[in-house]
Every structure is written in C-alpha cells, then in structure tokens.
Image (cartoon, rainbow, N blue to C red):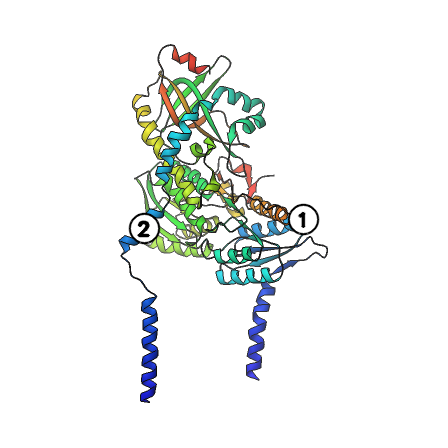
C-alpha cells in the first residue's frame, strides 16, 4: 500500500514538473505590445501610398465629360480602357477629373455642373459618405496578392478614406459656395450593368477652387 | 461476442458516416476525381455553392464527390484524409474555420492535391487559390444604405455569424467602418447566431426581452435575417424594425421585393463555384501559377434595384 503511494507521488511530481516547464508566464501588456509590433500598419501604408503613388499620378485621371460620352456610346470601351477592378464581377472603379461650377451645397455632398463645349454632366462630390474601396481600387496601384490577410487590405481602404476626411474635406467644406468654380480629381464606383449617369458620386482626392482664366483652361483638359 | 459486435460497430460506423456524407457522381470515363468539401449542407446557400461546383466539375469531365463537414472541423479533417487516400486530384473547399481548417489544407498540399477555397477564407497561403466574396465592400454598401434608411440615428442590433470565420468579421468590420461614424446610431446588442436561422430567432427573442426600443437589425447572413424577422413578427414589431441581411438567398430577395427585409447584399455563389471548378481543371491540365486570392463582387440589393436580381445572383 505504502509503495503504491510512493509510486503515485513520484508520477504526480514528474507530471507537475513537465507541466511547469511547458508553461511560461508573460505579462499581458508585453504580449499585446509584441502583437502590435507585428501587426500591419495600414495608416503608415496609406500615407506612403497617398504621397508616393496616388497624388503624383492624378493627371492621368480621365476627364468626366469625355468618359460619360464614351459610356453612352461605347460603354464596353469605356470600362475596358478607363476602369479598374480587383476581381470578378460588375463593380468597376474610375479615377476621373473635371472642372465646374458648384450649383448646390448639400448636407452630404456638393453638386457640381461640369460643362465643356460639347456636353455637360452633374457630379456629386461626396463630403459625408467617404467609405469603401473606391480610391484604393480606382488607383489600380494596391495589389491584393501582396497582403497576407484580406483584413489588412481592407484596413488600407479605411486609412485612405481617413486621409480624404483629414486632407481634402476641411478646406473643401470651408470654402464651398454656390457659384464658385472648382477643379477636382476623385474616384467613382460604377456597376457595369446598372450605369446611371444622371448623377455621378465622386470621392474627392484633390479639389481646388479656381479664379479668373484658369477656369476654362482646366475645364477643357 | 459483445466485444466482436462492438468492434464491428466501431469499424463500420465511420464507413457508414462517410457513405452518408458523400454524394458520388461517378463517371466511368472521367478525366479524374474532384472533391467538393463544404462547411454545411444545412443552409441552402451552401447547397447552391456545392451543387454548382460539382455540376461544373462534372461538366468539365470529372468524377465528383460532395462531402458535408456539418460545420465540424474534425469531420472536415476526416473528409480531407479520405480525399487524400482516395486519390482525388483537387479539392473545391468551403472551410469551416479560417484557422482551424489550415491544417487540413496543409495535409492536402503536402500530398500534392490542389485546394481551391470557395467563399470562405483560410488564414494561410497554402491553398492554390481562394475565390472569395468581397464581404467588406459589400457591407460598406449595406452600411451606407443602413445609415440613409435610419437617417443617421437610432438603436440597432447586430447578429454575427460564426465567430471563427473571417467572413463574419469582414462583414461586421465593413458595416462598422461606416456606421460607427454616426454617434447617434447606437448598437444596443451584438450576439452570434452562427449563421443559423433558428439560432438567430432565439437570439432575437432574448434580445427583445431586454431591448424593445430598436429601429434596425443588421444580420451577417440572410438565414439569420429571416430568423430575426420571425422573432420580430412574433413580437408584433416587424413593421417598426428594419432588417438587413447578407447573401442574396431566394426567400430574402422575395422579402426585399415585398418590403419585409430592407436590403441584402448579393453574393454570387454560382460564380465562385464555377470559377473554382474551372481553375481546378486548369490545374489538373498542367497550369500551376494561380492568383492566390480572387475577390468576387458583392452588390447591394434594395427595393429600388431588386428587379435586377434573382436568388443567388442576377436575373437571367
């Protein structure tokens, strides 16, 4: 009986020893700090993307009236030549530019009429609903396959949208008045099978107010 | 004698389960064998996904078997082991768990079997390709519509799907990336119902016992949206609370048409399934270079555009 107790005691002791050596205790703060060090920094990525890749290439954006003319007459070519998309489906993104007159200052957007010699188009510049992937995907410069996790890729969009809210919207909202003329570049989402040109909703990346001769110069580009 | 009976049962039961789980679509002159391993066939959406994948693979000339994991990673593990030993060349895979399913994909990869994930993601670069709905973008669109419908203020409930599934969080984060910008929109409860209609009904019933003052319910899939709607109807609140789903299931597309459900996000399971089968065929024919992740668009469906859509896709 006594031998059995000694045997069980030794086995128990060995088990406790094995268990103890397999556990290491760390402070929760330390674990969290290490995890955040390893985490992808979407904000830093977005800031770098904004300065190094997005802004330098804005001049390549397609002019809005040229695009709408193409969408009405040769939609397949318009999507083929000027839109970007990540995967399979009908949702496509355009980076567009234009110049026009502010016709209305709404709670959620500015209504801008873009007129050129041959046509005119209403564009709603979003000042409230700055969400989604339009800017990231319209640029065509952020590659999904470079991201380990889809959520990191999505966080880049959220960080880019935050830059629009921080850099673009404050001066736009502060200076917007009916009758003023603006030049703009921004991203637009369209469903290839449900194109609605009655009004185009644009997330602005760059907007500037125009004065004097500059107005027509930019409008005809 | 009793022991012999026990042994027979022990060996036969897994075989019987396997036979029950498999739907063998054999073809004597097949180009090879493709397995479709799906998280659950207890949800019509996944039935469409699995059946379409199988039909497309069959049309491409393969012998196809469908395996139902019943949302159980251990059962999924058995299916992978069977697929490996039975000489399948590719697996069209709808995982049960983004982390828990990685080891199964690793086993297949080690055995040289291509794995094409459909709809649900695993947190690994081991799958040959992952064909996934853009859940985050779909829920951003839903979120914007949600904010508009509630005029930027109100109390709402969120019912989440499986907490171990990336889709659950991509949807929730897409939705919150919009809604959280509006301080007057208050989430009074957030609970999981595992993408299950009955569980969602129970969850909603228990939430309603505490929170009667709600304006909307955002659900991570359509099955849960219908469950939540049932609970609201039983409580006489179906006309006061707007319900939002995600998937594009048949009953919810109809419910959007007649105003019972406010909106859903249309995924395209048939597109994902067909693409996975075609890529598997390309793989078996010798192609080895695939895009690791292939997103498939998700489109907002609301009363204003519902005529463009039918169950699980566009109106044809």
Q: Residue at x 35, y 13 (%)?
A: A211
User: Which is more toward the observer, A172 or A48?
Assistant: A48
Q: Residue furthest bottom?
A: A1
Residue B308: x and y in percent read 55, 36
Left or right: A36 in relation to B32: left
* Image disc number at residue A34: 2
Q: Residue furthest right?
A: B29
User: Which is more toward the observer, B240 or B35?
Assistant: B35
User: Which is more toward the observer, B159 or B122?
Assistant: B122
Residue B159: x and y in percent read 40, 50
Secondary structure of the residue carrying tag 1 is helix
The residue carrying pointer 2 sits among few (fewer than 14), some (14 to 19) or many (20 or more) residues within 10 Å by Cα, namely few
* Image disc number at residue B59: 1
Tell me if residue A138 comes above or below residue B2 in the rendering: above
Q: Could you tell me which chain the residue with mark 1 belongs to?
A: B
Separation of disc 1 and disc 2 at Cα?
A: 50 Å
Secondary structure of the residue carrying tag 2 is helix
Q: Residue at x 45, y 31 (%)?
A: A139
């Amino acid at each position: 009986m006594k031998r059995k107790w000694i045997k069980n005691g030794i086995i128990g002791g060995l088990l406790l020893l094995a268990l103890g050596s397999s556990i290491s205790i760390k402070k929760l703060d330390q674990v969290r700090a290490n995890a955040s060090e390893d985490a992808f920094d979407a904000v830093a990525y977005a800031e770098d993307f904004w300065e190094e890749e997005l802004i330098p290439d804005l001049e390549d954006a397609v002019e809005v009236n040229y695009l709408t003319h193409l969408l009405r007459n040769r939609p397949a070519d318009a999507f083929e030549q000027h839109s970007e998309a990540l995967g399979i489906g009908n949702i496509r993104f355009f980076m567009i530019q234009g110049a026009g007159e502010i016709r209305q200052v709404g709670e959620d957007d500015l209504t801008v009429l873009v007129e050129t010699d041959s046509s005119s188009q209403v564009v709603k510049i979003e000042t409230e609903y700055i969400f989604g992937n339009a800017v990231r995907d319209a640029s065509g410069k952020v590659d999904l396959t470079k991201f380990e996790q889809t959520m990191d890729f999505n966080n880049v969009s959220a960080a880019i949208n935050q830059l629009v809210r921080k850099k673009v919207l404050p001066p736009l909202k502060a200076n917007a008045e009916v009758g003023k003329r603006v030049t703009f570049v921004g991203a637009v989402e369209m469903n290839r099978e449900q194109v609605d040109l009655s009004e185009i909703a644009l997330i602005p990346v760059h907007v500037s107010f125009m004065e004097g001769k500059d107005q027509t110069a930019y409008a005809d580009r | 004698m009793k022991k012999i009976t026990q042994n027979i049962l022990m060996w036969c039961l897994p075989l019987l389960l396997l036979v029950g789980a498999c739907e063998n679509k054999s073809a004597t002159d097949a180009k090879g064998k493709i397995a479709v391993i799906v998280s659950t066939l207890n949800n019509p959406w996944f039935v469409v996904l699995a059946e379409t994948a199988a039909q497309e693979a069959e049309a491409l000339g393969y012998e196809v078997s469908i395996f139902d994991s019943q949302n159980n990673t251990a059962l999924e593990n058995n299916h992978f082991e069977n697929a490996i030993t039975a000489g399948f060349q590719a697996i069209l895979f709808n995982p049960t768990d983004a982390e828990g399913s990685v080891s199964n994909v690793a086993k297949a990869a080690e055995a040289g079997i291509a794995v094409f994930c459909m709809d649900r993601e695993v947190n690994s670069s081991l799958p040959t390709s992952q064909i996934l709905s853009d859940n985050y973008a779909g829920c951003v669109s839903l979120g914007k519509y949600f904010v508009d419908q509630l005029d930027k203020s109100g109390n709402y409930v969120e019912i989440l799907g499986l907490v171990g599934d990336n889709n659950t969080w991509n949807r929730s984060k897409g939705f919150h990336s919009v809604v959280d910008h509006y301080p007057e929109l208050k989430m009074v409860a957030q609970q999981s119902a595992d993408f299950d209609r009955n569980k969602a009904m129970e969850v909603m019933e228990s939430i309603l016992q505490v929170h009667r003052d709600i304006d909307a319910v955002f659900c991570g899939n359509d099955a849960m949206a219908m469950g939540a709607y049932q609970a609201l109807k039983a409580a006489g609140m179906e006309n006061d609370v707007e319900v939002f789903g995600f998937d594009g299931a048949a009953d919810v597309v109809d419910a959007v048409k007649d105003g019972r459900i406010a909106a859903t996000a249309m995924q395209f399971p048939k597109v994902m399934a067909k693409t996975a089968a075609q890529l598997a065929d390309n793989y078996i024919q010798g192609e080895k270079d695939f895009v690791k992740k292939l997103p498939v668009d998700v489109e907002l469906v609301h009363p204003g555009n519902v005529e463009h859509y039918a169950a699980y896709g566009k109106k044809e």
